[in-house]
Image (cartoon, grey):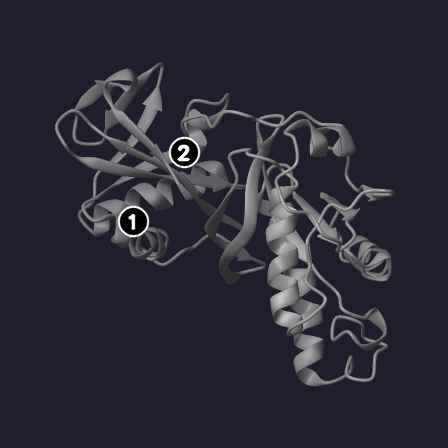
Amino acid sequence: MSPIFSKLLQNRSPVESNVFGRAIDRAANYETGVLNLYGDLPISQRGFEFVLDGRKVSGVADGIISIDGELTAIDAKYVDDWVTSLRNPASEIGGEPWAADEQQKMIQQAKTYSLNFPAGAIYHTNSVDLAAYYTNVFRNSGVRNFRFVITPATEMSKAMPKSYMEHILGVEFEHERKVAGTRPGEEASVRYVSFDDPASIPRLFHEVLNKPEPYLMDGGAILEGTKLELPDGSHFFAIQVTYDIEGWRKQVELGAKAIGRATAKVLDGDVIISDGRSYSLSSCKIEFD
């Protein structure tokens, strides 16, 4: 992925955003429309927890896809009117503390995505002004691994063909979801953690990353979205670590051990569990979020 990409989509009507109702509703419609641009690609909202400049950052990306085998964050930034937008520091409200906080969140989010998602982030926005302003802000903040795609907020009632965004971005998407740990290089960056109740996965994800207390200054983990059911009936969910791969892998393994959970990895077609068990991946049931 090239470091920075900005493109105007012309003569298309890619994203639905109702002109009536509240701004928050128009933004939600826009986000849905942006995800529709990717057709029926395996795209999902995924939680993440990272440490950026020594500070914990957590959240949920609007969407995450795999581009050329690398995870990429997808984010939608809808703007009603840039002149009055709280993300515009020159607007009437742009200097208010809560507006300044939102502007800083934009920068911190970009840093987080750039550092922790291998292919960075693709930002869709209907505002050329927002894209131009934050391209400069991101660059000045040291962020390089991002793209802005100008995406008009007009009506679209169904998902686009798979090839649409590939053509726009000039990249290849992963059209079939792969089991976490089976892509090249993921033997080290993906670990599975045992669970009993699917509803407990977000809590376990947080506990694993915070017991023991994180000692690493940067990087973190993504809740990857793959779950395995082993032939013996036990269940595991996938965590993908980033940046300091060895450090965060150890963090996951130590954290899981501290809360009484087994870990597993995929190696050469087998699922190898920390307690010595092993099964062929083909014998396991696989579920994707």
In the image: residue 246, left or right of residue 112: left
Relative to 98, residue 52 above or below = above
Res. 190 mark? 2
**Quadrant containing the C terminus in the rendered view:** top left
Q: Nearer the viewer, residue 156 or 67?
A: 156
Q: Nearer the viewer, residue 157 or 238?
A: 157
The residue sitting at 86% across, 61% down in the picture is 129
In the image: residue 93, left or right of residue 243: right
Q: Residue furthest left?
A: 232
The residue sitting at 36% across, 14% down in the picture is 268
Image coords of residue 174 (percent x, y): 57, 26
Image coords of residue 260 (percent x, y): 17, 48
The quadrant where residue 72 appears: top right
The residue sitting at 66% across, 81% down in the picture is 98
Residue kind at label 1, given as amino acid type = Gly
Q: CA distance from mark 1 to mark 2?
A: 15 Å
The quadrant where residue 85 appears: bottom right
Q: Secondary structure at mark 1?
A: helix
Relative to 104, residue 261 above or below = above
- Answer few, some or many: residues within 10 Å of disc 1's Cα (few below 14, many 20 plus, some between 14 and 19): many
Res. 255 mark? 1
Image coords of residue 250 (percent x, y): 36, 41
Q: Nearer the viewer, residue 137 or 225?
A: 225
Image coords of residue 244 (percent x, y): 51, 41
Q: Is label 1 in contact with label 2 (beta carbons under 8 Å)?
A: no
1 vs 2, front mark: 2
- Answer few, some or many: residues within 10 Å of disc 2's Cα (few below 14, many 20 plus, some between 14 and 19): many
The residue sitting at 62% across, 28% down in the picture is 173
Residue kind at label 2, given as amino acid type = Val
Relative to 92, residue 253 above or below = above
